[in-house]
Image (spheres, rainbow, N blue to C red):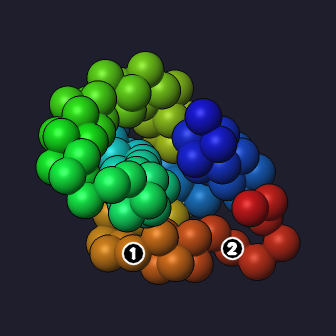
Amino acid sequence: MRTILFVLACVVGAGACGASGADCDKACRNYFKLHYWAESDKEIEKAPPDQRDALRKQKTEALDGRMNQELNMCVSQCRSAADTKLATCMQNAKTVKEVEDCVPPGEPE
């Protein structure tokens, strides 16, 4: 998935996470959720109004399964880096733009 690969590239390339396992778990989950819902909300908006609630429910049910497929790798890469700034920034982000702004300049997007 594009979002998890982006997180991994940032963490490995920047060497900027290095937080505890719990901090990295929170950071990776927040990053994934922000991107997941940004993409899902666009899809839900395009659906006919009478199908949106069902689609939102379907997306909600699929979230954890999709996230957990990639979470361990993201957390592992995060923990192996040397600095907690990226993890803290990613944990505190409230929007996709904020979480992407956590990545140092020059890192791939």
Measured as percent of width and height from the top left, residue 32 is found at 42, 48
Mark 2: secondary structure = loop
Residue 69 spot, x, y in % from top left:
43, 20
At x 66%, y 49%, the residue is 6
In the displayed structure, does residue 69 sit left or right of residue 83? left
Q: Where is 107 relative to 40, above or below?
A: below
Q: Which residue is mark 2?
A: 104
Whether residue 105 is situated above or below residue 69 in the rendered picture: below
Front one among 41 and 2: 41
Along the line of sight, which residue is nearer the eye, 52 or 24?
A: 52
* Visible residue check, residue 1: yes
- Quadrant into which the N terminus falls: top right
Residue at point 39% right, 27% down? 66
* Amino acid at dot 1: Thr
Q: Which residue is mark 1?
A: 95
Q: Secondary structure at mark 1?
A: loop
From the viewer's perspective, is 93 left or right of 43?
Answer: left
Q: Residue at x 69, y 73 (%)?
A: 104
Query: For the residue marked with disc 2, what is the amino acid?
Result: Pro
Q: Residue 36 location, x and y as percent?
A: 42, 50
Q: Which comes before the other along the chain, label 1 or label 2?
A: 1
**Neighbours of disc 2 within 10 Å: few (<14), some (14-19), many (20+):** few
Q: Is 87 in front, or is 19?
A: 87
Instruction: From this view, report whether residue 42 is shown above or below residue 6.
Output: below
* Distance between the alpha carbons at the discs numbered 1 and 2: 17 Å
